Image: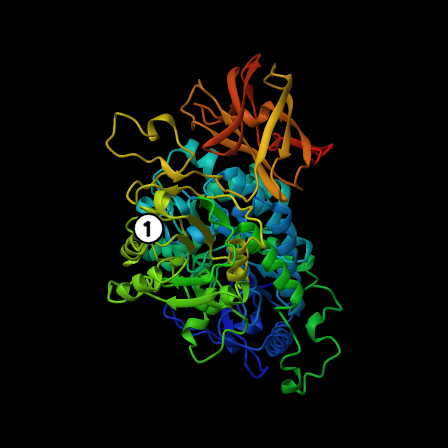
Amino acid sequence: MTLREKAAQLVGVWVGASAEGGEVAPHQHDMEQPPDLDTLLPYGLGQLTRPFGTAPVDPALGALSLQRTQRRIAAANRFGIPALAHEECLAGFAAWGATAYPVPLSWGATFNPELVRTMAAAIGRDLRAVGVHQGLAPVLDVVRDARWGRVEETIGEDPYLVGTVATAYVQGLESAGIVATLKHFAGYSASRAGRNLAPVSMGPRERADVILAPFEMAVREGRPRSVMHAYTDTDGLPSAADEALLTGLLRDTWGFTGTLVADYFGIAFLKTLHGVAEYWSDAAALALASGVDVELPTVQTFGQPLLDAVGAGAVPEALIDRALRRVLVQKAQLGLLDADWDPVPAALAGTDPGEPEALRGLVDLDRPANRALAAELAEQAVVLLRNDGLLPLRGPARIALIGPNADEPTAVLGCYSFPVHVGAQHPRTPAGIELPTLRQALEAEFAGSQLRTVRGVTVDGEDTGGIAEAVRAARRADVVVLALGDRAGLFGRGTSGEGCDAASLELPGSQRKLLEEVLDAGTPVVVTLLAGRPYALGRAVTEAAAVVQCFFPGEEGTRALAGVLSGRVEPTGRLPVSVPAHPGVQPSTYLAARLAQAGEVSSTDPTPAYGFGHGLGYTEFTWAGLTVEVAETGTDGEFRLAFELRNAGARAGTEVVQLYLHDPVASVVQPVQRLVGYRRIPLDAGAACRVVLALPADLASFTGRDGHRIVEPGALELRIAASSTDARLTVPLRLTGPVRPFDHTRRLHPAVTVQDLPPTPTP
């Protein structure tokens, strides 16, 4: 291959599929001018960027458009190499008419990696069926400041929860033959003041033990074939130019062998935003040397600037060869280099490409099975924060549904769902999927009740003129369902989403005023939230009859919420992020050291209203019968214990057993507690089980003073808990022997075994 042919495999071109089934066209965006395909394609092309995710297009015609384009690409270069097509798939395939699943923060709320794995496999099958090869998900950023706009895209504030759920997503996507992409590597979520792309200030231990831990788990256990670098710089070093991170740690230490792709325009940002490169060629050289293999979304620095740098001797051609080898190996794995490669995707097999209109409607990306899976995820993600006994509602005669999200179809969607991310730019195009509003869901769920709907205020507006009508409706009702929360958007066009950062965790706009005046009306109030981040809920924490939290639960989300309110659905979700008691205490998460807790040394109190892992149900569980087989072991040993869990209520339910480790004395400051394991355990009414735990000493490891991971001898405390603020059983433990060094091959999980016990006899 010539140098130009090699470099051509290291770039993408942002395109949009033809709505008529013709070839794709370069996407016109505000970052740069689109390239000329006739000039590029004779040398080959590495990737096609978002052919389905750029504009609304019928999925079958989009697949035909991609098919024809791939045939053109392969025919245009002398090696016959097609492009790799990638798409966003954060909460489902980001294409018109595709299922909108709950956002990742809802995945975290399920505490159910197995269900997330099933969802990801379904997403992967849809991607593969229409000719897509790579999905730009999951996000493994750990929440450090809930003001950050992209909290909705994360799985939560704990690295173990993030790691286990994200790994399951990777396994599901890869099982369908789709290249999973871990992002954003690394530190993006720790930006100062929660501002998008802001610099990151953190030490090496926080980076290793909090930020990098989920990536390490996913690389080891999920075996993803791609990683995307973060936009941010940490202590002045941009991730895209961090060779120690992208090559030294990711590849040389963890053994990652796939491709490393740029976040969109991330290489150019080395020049335009970070100021560490004077010329485009300098940016290309920095990224390539650091380990970035592919420039996305479109060719810029890896085009002529990189060729010029090689010609001038500033960049060794061997670096291009290194990246090229990774790209071609991946294309070979995908079958793109096979002699019998065929661009016809599975969804169009046996169809006539000469009759495009006959294909319209042929491909269904929102099948009943998808919707059923979206519903199951949404139901398991609903978190009941507070209940004074009002829920489940028992057929109230008059319901007042009040609030900005009462009758808004897109209130259940995050910023990377197609209807929000792309559809907002095409207001005359229908959403392509059914999006029942909360009003519609409640009308169906409570068919015998009279429902009156009043918006009161908008999500982020300051006009309070509608509150008086809302209060009148509240006073005339038997119960109020107050629908608060966010509007997803991009770069300031929403209250949650990329570039929609918050100055504080106060409810947006005039929602707090609406909340308080409706509470004052005297009617029992059920506060519901359809949101992308947690908010301080003020008086609702103590005065609302119930509080129900949903994190953008997807297309089936309002039905799931209505089902929880009626009791048709048992609430089993748990908080993946803490809900603050006060709006101005960020950055703060449960994963904090002693001096980050409330105390006499500071006048601010970061204690949450509802802590990480919290969630109520409609039944009660008892935790008893603790037996400890091994409470003292060596730093290379294992603790063993067991307890009994019983559903003491009158209906079936699910408890989420959470294991927290407390290290009272260590050579470096440790968080007061950290999650080291969990298990969802469903039990019928009266049923019981024995939960047997085996915890390797490896789980107590942390990054020591010298930057290496160790386990130290000494006392520990295991908290077997219903949440980070509700320990049910506490077990003192002790490690003995020498300080033991660890590497990335350490054990990452406890063994949790559930054994059935005889049920409680019924009278």
The image shows residue 120 at horizontal and vertical percentages of 62, 55
**Residue shown at the point (63%, 63%) measured from the top left:** 370
Please tell me which residue is depicted at 43% across the width and 28% down the height of the picture: 671
Find disc 1 in the rendering and name its residue: 195
Q: How many marks?
A: 1
Q: Quadrant of residue 489?
A: bottom left
Q: Amino acid at mark 1?
A: Arg
Q: Nearer the viewer, residue 453 or 630?
A: 453
Q: Is residue 340 left or right of residue 583?
A: right
Query: Percent x, y for residue 482?
Result: 39, 58
Front one among 226 and 551: 551
The local crowd at label 1, few if under 14, some if 14 to 19, many if 20 or more residues have their Cα within 10 Å, is many
Instruction: Estimate the x, y position of residue 247 in percent, counting from the top left.
Output: 52, 43
Does 508 sit above or below residue 608?
below
- Residue 135 visible, this angle: yes
Describe the element under mark 1 as helix, strand or loop: loop
Image vertical order of residue 433 relative to residue 505, above or below: below
- The vertical placement of 365 against 159, above or below, is below
In the rendered image, which quarter contains the C terminus?
Answer: top right
Q: Is residue 27 left or right of residue 95?
A: left
561 left or right of 177 in image? left
Residue 437, image x and y in percent? 47, 67
